Image (cartoon, helix red, strand yellow):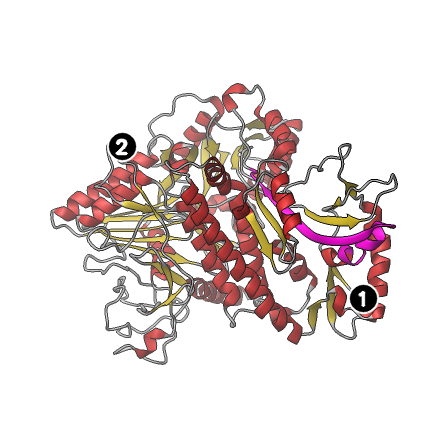
Amino acid sequence: MKPAAIRPDAGPHAASLSSNMSGALPAGQGASRECHGTVTNEVDTVIFQPTCSPVPLAPESVPMPSVSADPSRADASPSFALLDRDHSILSFNERVLDWAHRPEVPLIERLRYLCIVSSNLDEFFEVRAAPHLSAGSAGDRKGTYTVESFERLSEAAHALVARQYALYNDELMPTFATHGIHIVSHGERNPAQRKWVSEYFEREVRPLLIPVGLDPAHPFPQVANKSLNFIVRLGGKDAFGRENPIQIVKLPRVLPRLIKMPAKVSDGKTLFVALSSVVRAHLASMFPGREVGDFSQFRVTRHSDLAVDEEDVKNLRTALRQGLQHRHYGQAVRLEVSASCAESLASFLLAQFNLPPQALYRVHGPVNLARLTQLIDLIGEPQLRFPPYEASFPVTLSPAQSFFDRLQRGDVLIHQPFESFDGVLAFLRESVLDPQVLAIKQTIYRTGADSELMDLLREAVRRGKEVTVVVELKARFDEEANINWAEMLESIGAQVVYGVVGLKTHAKMLLVTRREGKQLRRYGHLSTGNYNPRTSRLYTDISHLTADPALTADMEAVFVHLASQSRLPKLNRMWLAPFDLHKNLVARIDALGQAAASGEPTRIVAKMNALTDEEIIGALIRAGQKGVKIDLIVRGACTLPAQVPGLTDNVRVRSVIGRFLEHSRVFYFRHGEDESLYLSSADWMNRNMMRRIELAWPVTDPNLRQRLIDECLVAYLHDGRDAWDLGGDGIYTRVDHDTHSGEAGASPAIEAHGAQAALMGRYASRGNHRDASAH
């Protein structure tokens, strides 16, 4: 197909947007100095000003460590060093933390970003830290995980945590205080406030606490993953005349971590007390007759990745439910204590959890910053939040029109969260209510514990339709919700299958079969993201609705394969992991490399969440060395070393961190006048390619393809506000949105844009235009 956007003479950072994009620049007002290059489409309009001067991530930034690519791979490129994946994950969290540092971001949202980083770090330790810790403890010096890798990772994690708490104490909390919002410590509370806290403790907290004194009959108690606890050293003797100085107090999860004080004791301010402060103030009353000495709050993080041998279990659902009971008590990988914790208590805890000193994190504040999301929920100040964004109903759909009639005229794209996920729910709702719909098939990966979509599937069963649901029970940290949904659907007669043994079903598909006259016709929905109404408001994803016979036939074949595990027929258009998705991607990249070596114009632009697959990275490096211009928009972990002289001069990597979580996967390839664009559920990671059921499918409609190029690729390559470029030194640097004004030929009146902000403006204006037309 002939290209609609990215021209042969385009520079490395291809980009353009249609002129009706909010804030578009008039033609000819792009930067004259070629830094990232300029790519234009048929209207020759550039909205996102290319910018050139980066801002370092942080003064403490250091290059990410590198690891050698596996030389045993027969298809490996000439020797090159990959960036370290785990350090790349921490680097991603540094970029998220940058939002919490920005003074122009509303205060509550800055706190939210801080909490997101804390939550991300929790998951990082739960999933990624154990191999490094085990290698460090064993003294391993060779292999992927070593003493050195453990020490480097610990150093990077400690530095990130230190920056979090410095921001919390030195910037965020003082700024909240200027708005009359305080978390009041015991020493700051006046007599009336102390009286109220004491009454709250006696009424709500003390009845739930049982201190455990340690002795031979009372061993160290089981401490659950990420739970809040106190360790206390007591003087004197117990009721039996013995000196058992160490006491452990576990604080139940049912207790709120922050409590809002009533107006009668708040002096016109918005005051909160932390649960840890409430307990700390009343420790002495919990041990009558004993002297309270040293004490500290503490929290242990445990390895939480469930490991179930699927080949050796008779019922996967039962095995996973049993595994969930033990998840909270896995291998300890991190210990957090108060900064003032006595060395003797910290050493005692490290010994109890079998942890080395590097696993100890002394923090100046609450040991779990992620729980400060409760503060966000309790503060009602709208001026301290982002202005609310209401997604428009999909602009190419009409709420009054039948989806089946609309899809017979052509495919529909929904760009979430700028357009509402309600369009997908409306499609399923019409399918459930339509008596001509005979069957509904759907995959479920993460849908949440309370889902209208699942209620619709339940109603479909009640109405007598054939409902088949492929539920992925192994979706990390969503296992319990998915098990519950599977049991509910099975109990009312739906056909529930759990995919293929040994593989996660990560593909997102919804297929509807409808009787139309004397024939059956299929209608499908494919997505880069999950069927989760809540996260659809927070993640950027593409939904693709289609009645294309070839594409829906492929969907049917995949559903049959997942349910029956019969041999998969040759698909018409889809690429399916673990069968041919990886092979086709590598072949496509290699083919473009061969074409570039012959002097033909070629181009690759791909957007994804992570890039860590060695074989794909090798193919990209080979293609770049042969002349293919490659731009990769990778939100999170990326182990490809971009912009290394003599190795990856033609490969650029950019990460965009915005108000919404970037989640869409879009892959663009061009050879001369032929271009192709694929949407996918898969990142370019080995796990996605080899250990999951994943889909990639082409968008063949030229107008829809152009829209995806404009909105998912061009916009992000010209983002001058929220983008970070990966340098040849392994450091990400933020693109400074102010630098364009000083460039020769640039207009000082033109402000650089963030991709997400511009897309929000585009869809807000389109939605308003449609609403006005309807009236």
- Compared to residue 356, the image places residue 46 above or below, namely below
Q: Position of residue 363 (x, y in %)?
A: 60, 57
- Compared to residue 20, the image places residue 68 above or below, namely above
Query: Dot 2 surroundings within 10 Å: few (below 14), some, or many (20 or more)?
Result: few
- Say what secondary structure mark 1 lies in: loop
Tell me where residue 257 sits by quadrant: bottom right
Q: Residue at x 36, y 43 (%)?
A: 612
Which amino acid type corresponds to the residue marked 2 in the rendered image?
Answer: Ser
Residue at which label 1 appears: 262
Query: Dot 1 surroundings within 10 Å: few (below 14), some, or many (20 or more)?
Result: some
Of the pair 397 and 774, the residue shown nearer to us: 397
Picture disc at residue 245: none
- Magenta segment: 279-304
Q: Nearer the viewer, mark 1 or mark 2?
A: 2
Of the pair 526 and 355, the residue shown nearer to us: 355
Q: Is residue 280 magenta?
A: yes
Which amino acid type corresponds to the residue marked 1 in the rendered image?
Answer: Pro
- Compared to residue 622, the image places residue 655 above or below, namely below
210 with respect to 4 (left or right): right
Residue at which label 2 appears: 72
Q: Residue at x 41, y 58 (%)?
A: 656
Residue 419 visible from this viewpoint: no
Of the pair 137 and 750, the residue shown nearer to us: 137
